Image: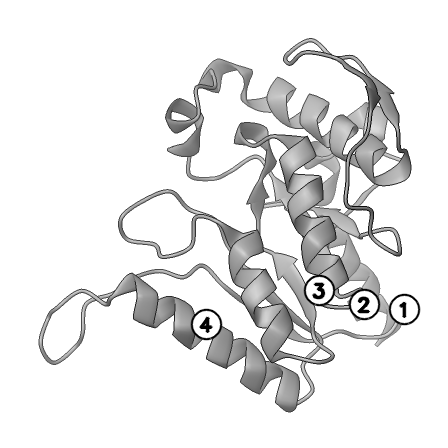
Amino acid sequence: MAFELGVYHFGELTPDPTTGAMMNPGVHLRHLVEQATVADQVGLDVFGVGEHHRTDFAVSAPAVVLAAMAQATDNIKLSSAVTVLSSDDPVRVFQQFATVDLLSEGRAEIIAGRGSYTESFPLFGYDLSQYNELFAEKLDLLLKLRDENPINWEGQLRPPLIDGDVTPRPDRQIPVWIAVGGTAAPARPRRLAPRVASRQERKSELLADC
């Protein structure tokens, strides 16, 4: 595996060091697109955008920002960093990133995570006590959505899908990674272990090849 070098950005809003005024979210979002453009021009491999649902972050919809970046870049991979899958709908996540992948001609990636910040759980009506169960079930559904269409699926925490037609379909299989704050092994749901890899594991593989 070739070594990859990239940038990820959470889109945090910080006060201007001179005036103390908080940065405007629209200006900051446009700056992020400009940064991705420069990263692409200098030959970096990947640009990742985080997801937060707080007033001190500009990015709550990473797929929308990545779609804008797709139109301003040519070669760089465009990834979430991370998609808070536990409090999102895997069907919509797949559709959004399939759209980014089609717009970018095959450059989208998903880094799925539980969320180190938990403000999205009450915001979208999820029970924080099901933190791990939500992630495991939604990751299972996301991977099946990636692999199959139409889809038949049943879990415990959302209604089943019966002959679900989930579109658009990308022209390739979108890479899905698991975001890990520590070591890879504890964060990977055991029943999904053969099917996905973590960014931490990928980093270890890359370093081993150096």
Q: Secondary structure at mark 4?
A: helix
In the figure, residue 154 lies in which quadrant?
A: top right
Q: Are marks 2 and 1 in contact (CB under 8 Å)?
A: yes
Q: Is the C-beta separation of discs 4 and 2 under 8 Å?
A: no
Which residue bears the numbered disc 3? 103
Reading the image, the residue beneath label 4 is 32
| Residue 171 at least partly seen | yes
Q: Position of residue 4 (x, y in %)?
A: 75, 73
Q: Earlier in the sequence, mark 4 or mark 3?
A: 4
User: Badge 2 is on which residue?
Assistant: 206
Q: Are marks 1 and 3 in contact (CB under 8 Å)?
A: no
Q: Position of residue 88 (x, y in %)?
A: 56, 32
User: What percent of the width, then of the height, locates residue 109?
Assistant: 72, 56
Q: Which residue was labeled with disc 1?
A: 1
| 40, above or below 77, in the image | below
Quarter the N terminus occupies: bottom right
Nearest to N terminus: mark 2 or mark 1: 1
